[in-house]
Amino acid sequence: MRFLPTLTALALCATPAFADPSCGGNFSGFVADLRQEAVDRGHDADAAQKFFAEVRQDPAVLKADRAQGVFQKPFTEFAQRLISTNRLDTGIAKGEALDSLFDRIEAEYGVSRGILLAFWAFETDFGGYQGDFNTLNALVTLAHDCRRPEIFRPQIFAALTLFERGDFDPQSTTGAWAGEIGMVQMLPQDIIDSGTDGDGDGRVSLTTSAPDALMSGGQMLRHLGWRAGEPWLQEVAVPADFDWSQSGLRTTKTGAEWAEMGITAREEDLAPTLDANILLPEGRRGPAFIAYPNFRVLFEWNQSFTYVLTAAYFATRLEGAPVMSQGNPDPGLSGGQMKQLQQKLAAQGYDVGEIDGILGAGTRAAVQDVQEKLGLPADAWPTQDLLNRL
């Protein structure tokens, strides 16, 4: 399950592009331009011809890209939907069955098993469903679409590189609608950068080999900045007189500084020297967490705040943490109301991104700023009262 492609792709696109990421227009002409660009980049002309020969536009990909209403759900509801008893039990059993593999991953890459198990579970249900979209068609369709061509266009040429290596079949390679492949859903450039032969058979098979997929996932997280031996998330208790404007990803303090402000961990102690943020996904009356630098690395895997927080929390559960305290949060907004809120915030000059009804990081930051200006508890949780005031 992906909200948007990994930020790995965004990072790749942050470097100077070989050509302008044009989009739209006649699809056949667009493919012809891609083929020419491939040759200009140094790819073999015959290989490029074969690679693009059967590519087709896929309307189902665009439909999937537009239909992500599940991310409009509040954190606790979203988490309950993804973290079933069966999924938790299966994850724990998988961890035990592959104990030596996860020990190896932690020794080589520093990535804790809970994190990889969580993404393995959420992305493909432990490899059970990896997607049936033709990967090349998905990438070219999304690059042709003018919503985010700069994300997907580089992945097409990465897939071409894999094709030239014999590791990608344009006709038979399938995966998620956004072009990710395998048990932990990696984009082509991720595979080039981090693909690892975990089972020692001389191939990197992310669709059929759990050792290959999990080792590659661990390598990718290390490549993205995962810090060995450090936590990523803890549930905390927050005092009633806390300055709520200090919550969220925009305010960073050390664990020791948060402790001085009355923040206490539900289990174990806060990491005193690590930078951290206090997260209130449903406001001051809902669950509360402290997030460390490794938490931010997870946004390189997925851009959805709710998805990342759910995966991080599930990872702690897989490693023995208790069920979170859900609290009693104020009722949130519906998807339609959230769009109204985003429109009002955008009209006031806030950058909330796309008007999509999803409470993402940009909308949260804008809500928190407006709450401060209105003299409300600035916990970044939008309510009907806030919408009425705006």
Image: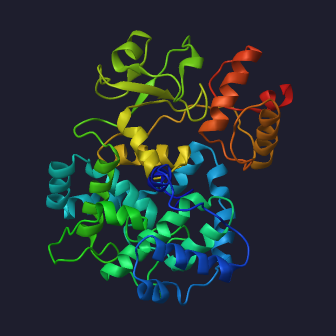
Frontmost residue, 128 versus 109: 109
Q: Could you tell me residue 382's position as x and y percent?
A: 71, 32
Location of residue 218 with respect to 31 vertically, above or below: above
Quadrant containing the C terminus in the rendered view: top right
Q: Who's the residue at 75% across and 47% down the image?
A: 355
Location of residue 380 with respect to 137 vertically, above or below: above
Residue 47 in sight: yes
Q: Could you tell me residue 32's position as x and y percent?
A: 60, 81
Q: Who's the residue at 48% across and 46% down the image?
A: 308
Q: Quadrant of residue 232?
A: top left
Q: Who's the residue at 29% across and 46% down the image?
A: 319
Q: Who's the residue at 48% across and 66% down the image?
A: 155
Q: Could you tell me residue 214's position as x and y percent?
A: 28, 62
What sort of colour scheme is used for the picture? rainbow
Frontmost residue, 174 versus 307: 174
Residue 137 is left or right of residue 89, and the answer is right
Residue 172 in sight: no
Q: Quadrant of residue 337?
A: top right
Q: Could you tell me residue 213's position as x and y percent?
A: 30, 67
Q: Total label count?
A: 0
Residue 292 is left or right of residue 73, and the answer is left
Location of residue 244 with respect to 71 vertically, above or below: above
Q: Quadrant of residue 139?
A: bottom right
